[in-house]
Amino acid sequence: MTTTPDPAAPPVAVLGAGGRVGRAVTAALLRQDHSVTAVLRDPDRHELPPHPRLRVVKGDAQQPERLSPILGSVGAVVLAVTPFTAPPPSFDGFDLDYYARIVTALDGAWTGPHRRLVAVGLTATLRLATGDAVMDDPDLFPARLRPFAEAHARQLSAVRATTLDWAILTPTADFGSHPGLAARQRYRLVREPLDRRQATARLSHATYARAVVAETGAPTVRAQRVAVVPVTEE
């Protein structure tokens, strides 16, 4: 007996599925009946729990032209890559266009009727009610990490120039596993500007992942950057 694919659960590719956020998103997608292709630069370094709807492939988000067969088989992509697992001692030589190059190349390599891109944002880029960005406040964001924030800011400019159906979902500053939080922590999507309390709220990876999953299957945010803010913290 064959089954009809659920249109609200399109097949999804997760670029950067081995990181903390990528793993949380992958798990959440599988729970919601999506078929997932986890794209990893080095699959041997990341052991994802086996699942009948999970396929793990080797690939590099910086070379999306080599991922064309994968991209052509999915209706949505989650961009959860990061150039490093921890802040480097120096940003000398860091490519400020790291994310911009990826989204531009994705636009060129990805063909098909449905091209939904949900990208993981960075709190530092969000605008506050004061008119400044979080990265401009030294109490909220270390100045030495500004090149990383600038790279995320350039991603926004680059994705605006594409024809992708995109959204950037940005977590709050206190973002982590937070195992003590309720498993069903509620959230809402907040458009900029944010107040300081919203920008610094405590958000779990699991809660953020649910927001990403919702925006892949039933988009409410298009061509915008929004913050994922926990309701319980407001």
Image: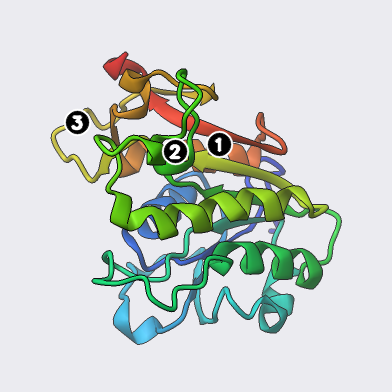
Asked if 65 appears above or below 25 in the picture, the reply is: below
Residue 24 horizontal/vertical position (percent): 36, 52
- Screen quadrant of the C terminus: top left
Question: Is residue 64 or residue 121 the one in the foreground?
Answer: 121
Name the image quarter holding the N terminus: bottom right
In the structure shown, which secondary structural element does the residue marked by tag 2 occupy? Answer: helix
Q: Residue at x 73, y 77 (%)?
A: 68
Residue 24 visible? The answer is yes
Secondary element under disc 1, as helix, strand or loop, is: helix
Task: Find out whether the residues at labels 3 and 2 contact each other: C-beta distance under 8 Å.
Answer: no
Q: Residues within 10 Å of mark 2 (few under 14, many from 20)?
A: many
**Residue at the farthest top position:** 234
Q: Nearer the viewer, residue 29 or 161?
A: 161
* Residue 86: numbered disc: none
Real-space Cα separation, disc 3 to disc 2, in angstroms: 14 Å
Asked if residue 79 lies left or right of residue 88, the reply is right
Instruction: Please tell me the numbered disc located at residue 214.
Output: 1
Identify the residue position indicated by label 2 in the image.
210
Mark 3 = which residue?
181
